Amino acid sequence: MNLTTEPWIPVVWNGGEAGLVSLLEAFERGHEIRDLAVRAHERIALMRVLICIAQAALDGPADEYDWKACYGRIAPSAIEYLRRWERSFELLGDGQRFLQIANLKKPVAKSGADEGNAASKLDLALATGNNTTLFDNAGGSTRAFTPADLARMLTTFQCFSPGGRIGVALWDGEETPGKGSSEHAPCLAGGMLHALRRGERLMTSLHGNLMTKRQAEQFYAPSSWGRPVWEMMPQRLADAEAVQNAVGTYLGRLVPLARAVWLADGGQSLILGNGLAYDSYDKTGWREPSATVVVRTVKGASQRVLLPARVEKAAWRELHSLTVKAAGDKPGGPAALEHLSDEAFDLWVGALVSNKAKPVDAIESVFHIPAQMLNAPSQRVYEDGVRVAETSEFRLKRAVSVYHKELGDHLDRPEMKIRRQQIQSAAGSQFWTGVELAVPRLLEVAENPEELGLRPRWQKTDWGKAVLSAMRAAFERACPHETPRQMRAFALGLKALFSGPANEGAAEAEEEVEV
């Protein structure tokens, strides 16, 4: 199967129909494709492949002026490029393969038997190895995959394979690095949250996420542009120039070779070992173009870190960080934001969340961002609005504890810690579910920050009212109030809900609440 001509990328056409396209079709008919139809981590990996092809074909754009003018050149340049490099995109067969090591062999086991790996290891959502079987009851059985599935799985695996123990293979007769241990693949390092501009069509999405050569110099170094890995495929670990291109340049890292893989022709098994070592942001300062860098206090000192993805904290609560333009090596959001000036835009945010070596969940959201959110005043107002909600969650948890204490269920005792966390987390989840529905109202406030005045009165805004409503609703659901004893506990909890030190909006709204 050749990925340039055979369909393997799931898409949604403009009319709403689902389909598969080849790399050539993705560019030939990019204006007819509304979007990719894949999971969050697959989207990131596939977009990196398409962006890499477009940028290699254009050998740019050179700067912002060239970026504005290059849209019409993307498709014809990429089509010509793919036809020129078509042989590098073979999935199976002899010779060079896409993201695979041709001279990879299995080590001979001590028993003399051959040890292999199931191809299902490439799909991080399937129960293989140490992945849970909770949502995959076929774990442990032999599975066959279509070439299209294998291509998508392999591309994603090279970007998101979690670190941990891994098999050792022989790469041109030399053991793969790490002695059976591996680090996270580049797109998972630091648990990073990814953000991409999303256009009305696939082609506009690609254009919006291209990095210019001038940007690459500012983000990395003058000699950091590089070439795609398939143009300089390392033949052995000692192939220093090809290895440096793969791990130390912009185009080389876009489609990484984090694992040494060779697929069996039947598509059911593979040879697997550790691949090339990609330095993470905390070691060398190399940031992926879709990552966001923030300043956090770590052990009492300010430190730049990647904004992490968290299952328990929705991405909308970080939009004030995600929308900061990252000029050069300064903290900020994805590189694509530098192309924006005074227009609203759609921002796709997603990630694969892992717990050490185990994938936990894939998360994603899409936000329509007003142009004002690219400016510091709106970002500060948005952050304040998020803080209003976070303070309200604290109030809610405190009120739930007061309610239970009145009923004789003392959640503040040390031995009740687990039960307290379970009860408060359930109330908190209900609260955040209700609040999330009102995020467009918070964006409206941030769009016109001057309307809040010097002394913000959040309780007067639709956002503040929505937060209070969600807080009250979550409290009522978490605290039954049918019996006289429950009603007394409910009244005391409700009083705690709207009293005490907290944000002004909630405090001033106390007199408006019926107890």
Image (cartoon, grey):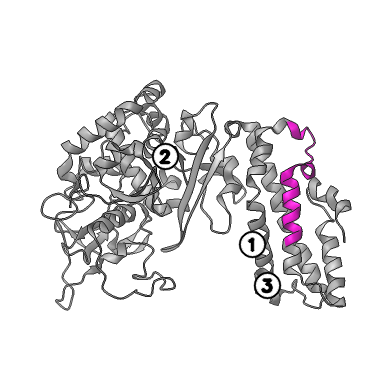
- Image: magenta residue range: 451-473
Residue 338 pos. (x, y %): 48, 30
User: Depth-wise, is mark 3 or mark 2 nearer the camera?
Assistant: 2
Magenta span includes 311:
no
Residue 100 pos. (x, y %): 21, 53
**Mark 3 or mark 2: which comes first in sequence?**
2
Q: Amino acid at mark 2?
A: Pro
Residue appearing at x 41%, y 63% in the figure: 357
Q: Main secondary structure of the magenta part?
A: helix
User: Depth-wise, is mark 1 or mark 2 nearer the camera?
Assistant: 1
Q: Residue furthest top?
A: 65
Marks 3 and 2 sit apart, C-alpha to C-alpha, by: 41 Å
Q: Amino acid at mark 3?
A: Lys
Above or below, comparing residue 301 to residue 267 in the picture: above
Marks 1 and 2 sit apart, C-alpha to C-alpha, by: 32 Å
Q: Which residue carries the number 1 mark?
A: 429
Marks 1 and 3 sit apart, C-alpha to C-alpha, by: 18 Å
Residue 322 pos. (x, y %): 54, 41
Q: Which residue carries the number 3 mark?
A: 417
Frontmost residue, 453 versus 325: 453
Q: Quadrant of the C terminus?
A: bottom right
**Mark 1 or mark 2: which comes first in sequence?**
2
Residue appearing at x 71%, y 45% in the figure: 463
Q: Residues within 10 Å of mark 1 (few under 14, many from 20)?
A: some
Q: Which residue carries the number 2 mark?
A: 289
Residue appearing at x 56%, y 38% in the figure: 369
**Taking 246 as reference, is 187 left or right?**
right
